[in-house]
Amino acid sequence: MTHIEVPESLRDEIKASHGAKQLPQEIQSQLFEAAVRAKSKSYSPYSKFPVGAAVLTESGEVFLGCNVENASYGGAICAERTAFVKAVSEGQQKFLAVGVVTNLKSFASPCGFCRQFMVEFGKDLQVYLFQEDGSVQFYVLRELLPHSFGPEDLEQFNAQA
Amino acid sequence: MTHIEVPESLRDEIKASHGAKQLPQEIQSQLFEAAVRAKSKSYSPYSKFPVGAAVLTESGEVFLGCNVENASYGGAICAERTAFVKAVSEGQQKFLAVGVVTNLKSFASPCGFCRQFMVEFGKDLQVYLFQEDGSVQFYVLRELLPHSFGPEDLEQFNAQA
Amino acid sequence: MTHIEVPESLRDEIKASHGAKQLPQEIQSQLFEAAVRAKSKSYSPYSKFPVGAAVLTESGEVFLGCNVENASYGGAICAERTAFVKAVSEGQQKFLAVGVVTNLKSFASPCGFCRQFMVEFGKDLQVYLFQEDGSVQFYVLRELLPHSFGPEDLEQFNAQA
Amino acid sequence: MTHIEVPESLRDEIKASHGAKQLPQEIQSQLFEAAVRAKSKSYSPYSKFPVGAAVLTESGEVFLGCNVENASYGGAICAERTAFVKAVSEGQQKFLAVGVVTNLKSFASPCGFCRQFMVEFGKDLQVYLFQEDGSVQFYVLRELLPHSFGPEDLEQFNAQA
Ligand SMILES: [Zn+2]
Ligand SMILES: [Zn+2]
Ligand SMILES: [Zn+2]
Ligand SMILES: [Zn+2]
C-alpha cells in the first residue's frame, strides 16, 4: 500500500472548500502514478480497456484499483469501485480524492455506477481524470452526479414512516 | 401496454431543443399516472421503498417499470432500468422521456446506475421526477450525468487502436 | 405479449414434482420460439453475443427478454433478468419455466447473476436451454444454484435478532 | 495483508484433486480468523447483515473482503467480490480457497453473483462456509455453480465466428 502525506492544514482547507481547492501538483502526480500502477493489474479480457484508479483517504492512505471483468459482462467491477471496496474493507470510509486513468487519448470520466458508489461516502470527493501523458481534468463528485440519490433520501424516507 | 399520442411536430421540437422543451401538462400527467401504476407492482421487500417508472418512446409507446429487489442486495434492478429493458426487449431504442415516482415527500432522482444505463440510449432524455401529489421536477439527462462515459468513448478507443 | 395455455392439471403435476416433470414437447417448442424471437431484440454491441429468454408464468403468460448492454460493461442486464423484471412489473411473481437461447453451438447456461435473480422467486423453476437448431437441455433451478442464498436466509437472520 | 504459508506439496495435492482435498485444520482456522476480521469492516447500514470473506491465493497471500452497500441497493458489492477484486488489483489471479462468515446461526452460502464472479478465475476454488462459532461447511465452487457460464463459452463463440 502506498501512503501520501497530506498536511492536516491542507486537508482542512480542502474540506472547508467542499472539495473545490485542488491538491498541489506534487500530490496530484503521486495520485497519477498510483493510478497508472493500478491500471497495470487490470483484468479486462473482454473490453480490452484497462482502467486504473487510486483513492486517497483523509488519513493519507492510497488504495489502488483496476477493473475486473467477467464473462457475464454485467459482472464487471470498475477500477474506482475496486479502489473503494479495498479502502472500506481496510477500515477507511473518509475519502479526499480519486484519480482515474485509462489508455484513451481523451479524458474518461467515471461511469454512473461508480459515481453512485462513491457518492455514498461523500459528495465533496475530488475527482482527477488523468491521461497517460499526465494531463489532468478536475471535478468535484457533486458536479458529476448532481441531485444525487443517497443515504439521506432513505433516511428521510424512514423518518417519514 | 399504454400508448401516449405525441404529435410529430412536438417530437421534432423536443429533439431540436435537445430535450429542453417540456412535454405539455397533459402528457406529463399521463406519464405521472403510468409511473404511479408501475409503482404498485414493485417487489421491494428489503428496502420497503417502492419506485415506479414510465418511459415514453419516440413512437409513443409507454413502458412501465418498478424496482425488483433480491436477497443479495446487489442484485436489485431499479424501476428505471426495468422500464428500459422492457422497452428495448420490445424493439424500442429511441426514448423521449422517463417519469419516476416514489413515496418520498420530496423529489427522488434516478441513481447513478440508472443514469448510466439510460444515457446509453441518448443524453437528451427528459427526466420528470414526480411526487405522489403530482408535483414535478424536470431535468434533461445530460444535466444529471454530465461528462458521461458512453458508447462514444469506446468507439474512440477502438478508433485509436 | 404471448400466452401459452398450460392446463391446470399439468401445472399441478409440475409443482408437485418440484419442477422435475417436464413440459410437453409442444409447450417447449412454443417457449423456444418465444426465446428466439426475444433474442432478435438484443442490444449487445459490446459482446456481440445476443441472448433471448422467455419466462412462462403459472398463469400462462410469456414474457420475452433479451440482453441489454452498456458502455460500462458492468451495467449489462442479461436476457433472463430482463424477462423476469418485465413479468414482475406486470404483476407476475409465480413462474413455471424459463427458456434461454443463444447463437452458441452448445448449451449456454444462465450466469450466476441470473440464477440468483431468478431463485428469489422459487427454486423449482424449470430451465430449458435451447440451441438455435431446437435441441434442448433441461434443469431445475435448484440444480443450477444448489445451497442458494435467498430470502429465507434474511428471514432467519431477522428472526435471530 | 495477511500471509498463510501453504506448502507447495499441499498446494499440488489440492490442485491435483481439483479442490476436493481440504486444507488442514490449522489453515482453515487462519482463514476463519481472517474472514471474521474482515467482517468487522463491513459497511452494511441497509441490510444490517455484515459479511466477511478471506481469499487465499496460490502464493499464500490472504485478502480480506467485506460487503459494501449503497443507498441504491443494487450497488452493493459482497464480501467475496471485494476480496477478489482486492487480490486481482494486487496482481493475483490464482486462488486456492475462500472463507466466508456471517452472523447467521446457520451456513450462508455465497450468492449467485459472487459464484459467477469467482468462477471466472477457476472452478476448483475451495469454499469454506464458517459460522461465528467456528463450525464449517466445505464445497468446491464447481458444486455451487454447476454447468457454469464462463470465459470458455465466449471463447467458443469467438471460435465459431
Ligand atoms: Zn465505473
Ligand atoms: Zn436506479
Ligand atoms: Zn445472466
Ligand atoms: Zn454475493
Image (cartoon, coloured by chain):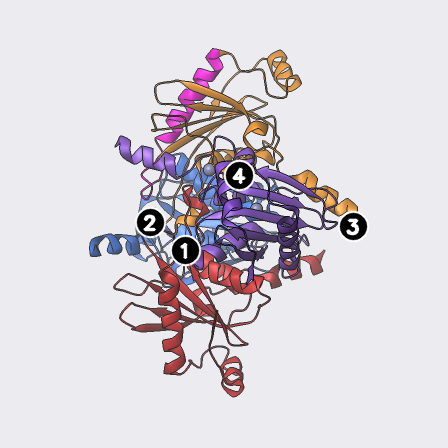
Chain colours: A red, B blue, C orange, D purple
Magenta highlight range: C25-49
Give coordinates of residue C3: x percent, y percent.
49, 21
Q: CA distance from mark 3 to mark 4?
A: 36 Å
Residues at marks 1 and 4 on the same chain: no
Give coordinates of residue B64: x percent, y percent.
50, 40
Q: CA distance from mark 1 to mark 4?
A: 27 Å
Give coordinates of residue B148: x percent, y percent.
37, 60
Residue C29 belongs to the span the image colors magenta: yes
- Say the numbered circle drawn on residue C26: none
Ligand 1 within 8 Å, label 1 CB:
yes
Camera-nearest residue between D1 and C157: D1
Camera-nearest residue between B86 and C73: C73
Question: In this figure, which residue is indicated by the disc labeled 3?
Answer: C161
Q: Amino acid at mark 4?
A: Gly
- The tag earlier along the polypeptide, 2 or 1, is 2
Question: In this figure, which residue is indicated by the disc labeled 2?
Answer: A47
